Image (tube, rainbow, N blue to C red):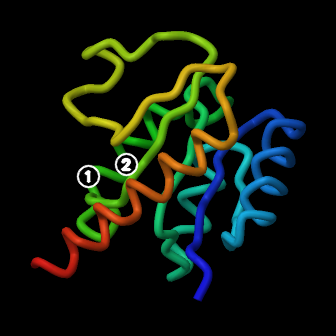
Amino acid sequence: MKKKILVVEDSMISRLMLQRFLEVNDFQVQVASNGIDAIDQINTDNLPDIIVTDLKMPYMDGYQFLKVLRENTITRKLPIIAISAFDLLSEEELQGHTFDLCILKPFSLDHLRNDILQLMDGYEECIQSN
């Protein structure tokens, strides 16, 4: 069964590029253009295995999105990768919550794929041990 990835990115070009690359690499990909759209998708009992999110987006940015996910018992432990063109991960913005991995743009798609696989393996091991 294909692993599900939710890509949250406001740039249509970046979103499509990530979607196509991940689909070619045998992932089932859902996309959202901001955190609000992503939360709506997650609440429809369609939980992804991992989330890749941009930080600077309209309506609900990556920091707010992270906060909502980490405060929900269902999504609290989902692996989340943040992607940003800026190194803006201050403690104030994170509000005590953490991303599993932060990647600065530009980045290698192959490295992203490897990071996703590594985080998914760790997440599955964590679930199986609980």
Element type where label 1 sits in the image: loop
Task: Give the residue type at disc 2.
Answer: Val
Element type where label 2 sits in the image: helix
How far across and down, in percent of the image, does residue 121 sit? Answer: 36, 65
How far across and down, in percent of the image, does residue 129 sit? Answer: 11, 78
How far across and down, in percent of the image, does residue 96 sit? Answer: 19, 29
Q: Quadrant of the N terminus?
A: bottom right
* Numbered circle sitting on residue 71: 1
Q: Residue at x 61, y 59 (%)?
A: 6
Relative to residue 25, is residue 101 depicted above or below? Answer: above
Nearest the viewer among 84 and 110 is 110
Q: In the image, is 104 to the left or to the right of 23?
A: left
Mark 2 residue crowding within 10 angstroms, few (<14) / some (14–19) / many (20+): some
Q: Residue at x 47, y 42 (%)?
A: 81
Relative to residue 109, is residue 86 depicted above or below? Answer: above
* Numbered circle sitting on residue 68: 2
Q: Residue at x 50, y 53 (%)?
A: 116
Q: Dividing the picture into quarters, in which one does residue 122 lie?
A: bottom left
Task: Give the residue type at disc 1.
Answer: Glu
Q: Residue at x 56, y 75 (%)?
A: 3
